[in-house]
Amino acid sequence: MAMRLYSVAVYLFLYVPIGIIVLFSFNSGRHASSFEGLSVKWYGKALSNPFVLEALTTSLIIALSAALLSSLMGTAAALALQRIRGPLRAMFDGLIYVAIMIPGIVIGIATLIALVTVFDLLNPVLGALWPADAAPPKLSLGYASVIAAHTLFTMSLVIVLIRARIAGMDRALIEASEDLYASPWRTFLQITLPQLFPAILAGFLLSFTFSFDDFIISFFVAGPNTTLPIYVFSSIRRGITPEVNAIGTMVLGASLTLLIIAQVLLRRREGR
Amino acid sequence: MSKSYKDNLPITATKLMEELERYRKGSVSRRHFLGVTGLGTAMAVLSSAVPGLAPRKSYAYGDLGDRLVFSTWPNYHNPVNVEEFTEATGVNVQINAFGSNEEMLAKLQAGATGWDVFVPTNYTISNYVELGLIQELDLSKMPNYDAGAQNPLFAGPATVNGKVYAVPKNWGTTGFVLNSNEIKSGPKSWKDFFEVTMAEGSGHTIVHDYQLTTIGAALCALGYSFNSIDEKELAEAEKVLIDAKPHLFAITSDYQPGMRSGDAWMSICWNGDGLQLNTDLPEMQYVIATDGGEIWSDFYAIPTEAPHLEAAYAFVNFLLDPYVQVREFASHGYASGDSRVSAMLPADTANNKILFPAVELMNGLEFGAAQTLTDPGRAELIARFKSA
Amino acid sequence: MTGESTKGRWLTVALLTPTSAWFLVMLVMPLVVVAIFSFGERSAVGGYTASFTFDQYANLPSRFTAFRNTLTYAPFGTLVSLLVAYPLAYFLAVKVSPKWRLLLLVLVIVPFWTSLLIRTYAWIFILGGRGIPTLLDYIGFEGVRLINTPFAVVVGIIYGYLPLMVFPIFVSLERLDKRLLEASNDLGGTPFRTFLQVTLPLSMPGVATGCMLVFILLMGEFLIPAFLGGGKVFFIGNALVDLFLQSRNWPFGSAVAVTLVIIMLITVSLYMRLTMGRAADRNESIM
């Protein structure tokens, strides 16, 4: 009983702030502090504000790219790492460990100063090499740098997840497949990949979530791009209006919807 | 979700009533009333106030594109103006808020900000020019800029080596605001400010999170220059700040939410923000310290790499229109050095002590100096203070 | 590796190339640049000037408080999160009927799906003068200040990282064979003894994983102290942002970053040695 009460208290602790965010998103007043009446106007404002939509699009593009790249490269690397031993393997293990452990703030700052320095060196070279009649491309911070910086961390996360899965995988099936003279490629497609799939999916979702919610790395390396968290940060500084609450509530709603859809789809598959 | 300034309101309710009263009594014109209150329909005000922009804007400015990135300070604009600009030109304005010149400089120095227009303060402009971060302005693209109407005291820093790199926005002072319901001893100087911080106001005082004003206030309290970069004087100022730190409520430049929620009772404050607070909550009193402080002037400038140059010029030109400036004033409460604007303000504005302090107080104030911004000693001092 | 065909070897190389390139450009290069910068000097207007000096490292003691705060709040925050999370994880894994388990578990993560910024901002309101202190006023506790205190920062930490702690503990407790608990009870163990001698040791891998995740994130924390500490509770993360965005002192910022990375490498390696030796032997992955 005590346990149950305690858990209720923890859930309250988790949901009171969420409740406040949602409640104030329906505030008709301008202030986040005094509730003046029910209204959905801030949803309209947020949805018709081109910069909210653009920030959302930017965040989605970055998070999807980072998640795709991470799951592809992470899976490939995890599979390859099973095949090597020795110092090379130790080196990769070390790199993965460091990539996961280094705080985002250090990654953000280090990437910023490294890229700015390298771009400053490369841009004149590019300018000199480029044909005189065309404007040379100019390297600068932007989508690519954020995606690359997010992918460093999320890819390492995917490698760890998939290696755990490989370790727990049923080798008998693979051996059976090989005994039946299936080509390695077929074995991979029909046996290995389906077994790895839950881990890859989990890695993809984790990567997406991390990248979508990241503020500190993007803050340093996004250049002129504004992601949703950067937009929210700037709004909070300008004096928060319920528009920010509306954005938060919509993101929450979208995630919940996706979760329910995924749940229904999974149920169906299991039901077959 | 603390209460922030009604930055999206064109005008406060009290003020609206005052304006309405004036309009009824006939002391202001209808156009003025509509302009100040933001009640005029967008196009009506625009067409009368911004010749060349309203009906023929595309001819006047060429293709402006659909976007503009604008970096400025919190509580510093009238959203109605920005909305009108978007309506009239199709250019959407993304506003980023920054709390200090140092931060703006850091962002620009790191490159690729994507900013089209930003708002630097007087003492930073020569630094920006030296670093090649802002461009010389083509004044012919800003017909609303009237050089002759500017107060040279506030417009001066925009000209570097005979070239104009910025146009003046507003000017103001840096003093402190106090909640007179809580702070009864009536501090008058920075010396009092720090003494009250350690006693009556302990746990309820805010200082800014950037070096210029916070270190400047401590220096003034000691009787030194606001701009001092003398090592010995800075060391003494550091001691004042470190001693005060345990008694502070917060170290932040976004002090309005704390003051409004009642958590903070006293804060270093810019006068317009003081006026915003005072208008809503009469117990909030703005004080210009008798032992000195800052007088400053803000500008619009365009970064060297501004991606939407034409839109940037159009936006600055729009904001320089006297009527638009009057509405900006109604929202943020900072005075303009543009005599065309002063002429349009209600007569009693000139008597407002928050806006226009007494001459003897004004004389004690200093403009921030260029080397104050970049001095490594001050940069390191504030960083040490914050991490202490 | 000896028996592997050339084709297989090429495949391995091909699979590893993108990842290697990524590590090289996005991890090794930035860390090397930061290391080089940390021996440089701040140029007159800020930024970096090439040089070779140990001045930046000599200046580290000036950030002693920030390092000390980080090194006390990170373990303390981890510990408090653990204390709050463990009973909940235990409840979910052992006490709740399976029918409700998934739903209740999902409910722990859902708050994670609104922006961390917005969630933290909600606490500014709750802990600020118009929030809990007003309620306390009603029942006679006047003048309580919560916002911008160490307490507010700890609340923010627990709120931000609770799910990260609940999850691994839940997983390790759920895997636990319930028959072991029954056996212990049958042998006359009190519930408390059963918990101490059976449940707790078996849940240690989850505890260790959760603690490490939270600890790592706290070491680089910036937002929570900035929002809920009012700039008064200063972490290394805040010092770093300050050095890059206010003082524009890239070399000193680099030196602080290098020091933070070294401290983390040492503490986390030690921690893994101490807590995970056995888990690693059993081939249980850390994360």
Image (spheres, coloured by chain):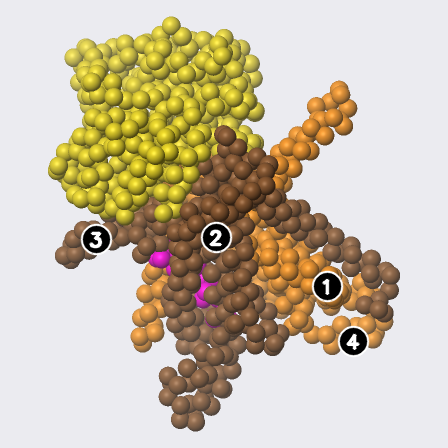
Structural distance between the alpha carbons of marks 4 and 2 = 48 Å
Could you tell me residue B67's position as x and y percent? 52, 26
The lab-note entry on whether marks 4 and 1 share a chain reads yes
Q: Colour of chain A?
A: orange
Quadrant of res A147:
top right
Question: Is residue C132 visible to the viewer in this orientation of the structure?
Answer: yes
The lab-note entry on whether marks 4 and 2 share a chain reads no
Give the residue type at disc 4. Ala
Structural distance between the alpha carbons of marks 4 and 1 = 32 Å
Name the element at disc 1: helix
Could you tell me residue B238's position as x and y percent? 33, 39
Structural distance between the alpha carbons of marks 2 and 1 = 30 Å
Q: Colour of chain B?
A: yellow
Chain for disc number 1: A
In the image shown, does B334 or B220 lie closer to the viewer? Answer: B220
State the residue position of label 1: A87
The crowding category of the residue bearing disc 4, from other C-alpha atoms within 10 Å (few below 14, some 14 to 19, many at least 20), is few
**Main SS of residues in magenta:** helix
Furthest residue toward right: C6
The crowding category of the residue bearing disc 2, from other C-alpha atoms within 10 Å (few below 14, some 14 to 19, many at least 20), is many
Please report whichever mark, 2 or 3, sits nearer to the chain's N-terminal start. 3
The lab-note entry on whether marks 2 and 3 share a chain reads yes
Q: Is residue C155 magenta?
A: yes
Q: Colour of chain C?
A: brown
Give the residue type at disc 1. Pro
State the residue position of label 2: C220
